[in-house]
Amino acid sequence: MKKLLIIAGIAALAIACKKKTATYTVQQRPLNEAVYASGEIMPQAYYFLKSNSTDLILQMNVEEGDTIVKDQVLAVLGTPSQLTQLDILHSQVALAGKNAAEGSATLNELKTKIEQAKQTYEQDAVNATRYTDLANDKAVPEKDAEQKRLEAANSLTNYQSLQQQYLAQKNELAGKLLQSRQQLATSSQVREGKVLKSPVNGSVFKIYNKAGELSELNNPVMLIGLPGKFKLELLVDERDISKIKMNQKVYFETDVYNGKQFTATINKITPVLQKESRSFQVEAAVQDSIAFYPQSSVEANIVIRENTSALMIPAGYLLKGDSVYLRQGSELQKKGISTRSKNDDWVEVTAGLKAGDIIAKKE
């Protein structure tokens, strides 16, 4: 399709054969004007699921056309050894958590030693007090009392040392648990990028890689989305973007349905120029409910004006510099005019002529 400038109800031109000069009476005519755009048709809501690194497709759990639900695992990337490594880290976290728990064997053993040391200290403290009292009463030698006091002091030191060991062991085990969890979190984060889940309830439209194939970094593994509703993603030349407005009608064709025309409505204009193509992207909601094929190419005409009454002249009467020969009585006079829309057949005149004027074309 080419840029349109369609005139409805074309009348026969008035031709004067005298001196081989053709004439035309300027008049208002219905005009349809459109801007050409090209692009592709896509689901109204769609997602390209991609790998965050170059990886092997380890598992492909769906096929094209399958119905899927949110959070369903669609594919798994990586290698079997990476899965094994993740299982090992899970086991390490479980073990570290078990060791760091209050009832763990390691901590319980220290608790038992602490309790025994406490009992020993309490007994030695009682003996030290008793022997000190006996020594004061001259019932036992002072050196015996001193020995008991030394044994009580040693028991206290051992008791306090075991308490410190318990705290140190508890902190060490908690640190190992934290370290294991951090390693698991890091590996899980990497792994999450290798487990492709569906963000929506929808359908699988396209699978680009099979199980056992290599998926390159940022290349799509599959295209999924919501079935039933579609949109056009179109590129409009930068010279035409100022004419595009929201809710304009779009007529489009796709090779999948060769020769059939469909309609859409502009619902998004992205105001950023794509430097590579010198074009702007616009989107249009497809009105037809037929089953389209995502990523099919389309050619479209965005209707700028439809059935508008405009002053029109045949393109063959327009001279260089936007001027025409205007008949003034029996003479022809060259006159400048202002124009807007043009194609190979017709020209819209915005100033310089009025309905009823007669213009001429010299053969």
Image (cartoon, grey):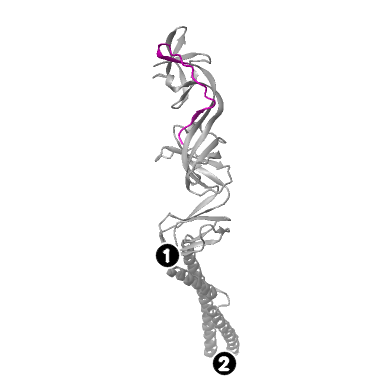
- Check the picture and name the quadrant holding the C terminus: top left
Task: Name the residue: 53% across, 18% down.
Answer: 27
Could you tell me residue 158's position as x and y percent? 52, 81
Residue 92 vertical placement versus 121 (above, below): above
Task: Name the residue: 51% across, 78% down.
Answer: 161
Residue 352 vertical placement versus 37 (above, below): above
In-front residue for pair 183/153: 183
Could you tell me residue 342's position as x and y percent? 46, 26
Q: Is residue 141 magenta?
A: no
Mark 2 or mark 1: whose residue is earlier in sequence: 2
Q: In the image, which disc is placed on residue 315?
A: none
Q: Is residue 144 left or right of residue 54?
A: right
Q: Which residue is mark 2?
A: 140
The alpha-carbon separation of the residues under discs 2 and 1 comes to: 89 Å
Closer to viewer: mark 2 or mark 1: 1
Could you tell me residue 16's position as x and y percent? 45, 14
Residue 47 vertical placement versus 214 (above, below): above
Query: Mark 1: few, some, or many residues within 10 Å (few <14, many ≥20)?
Result: some
Q: Which residue is mark 1?
A: 212
Residue 51: name its quadrant.
Answer: bottom left
In-front residue for pair 36/222: 36
Task: Name the residue: 46% across, 40% down.
Answer: 38
Q: How many marks?
A: 2
Q: Secondary structure at mark 1?
A: loop
Q: Which residues are magenta?
A: 1-23
Could you tell me residue 107's position as x and y percent? 54, 78
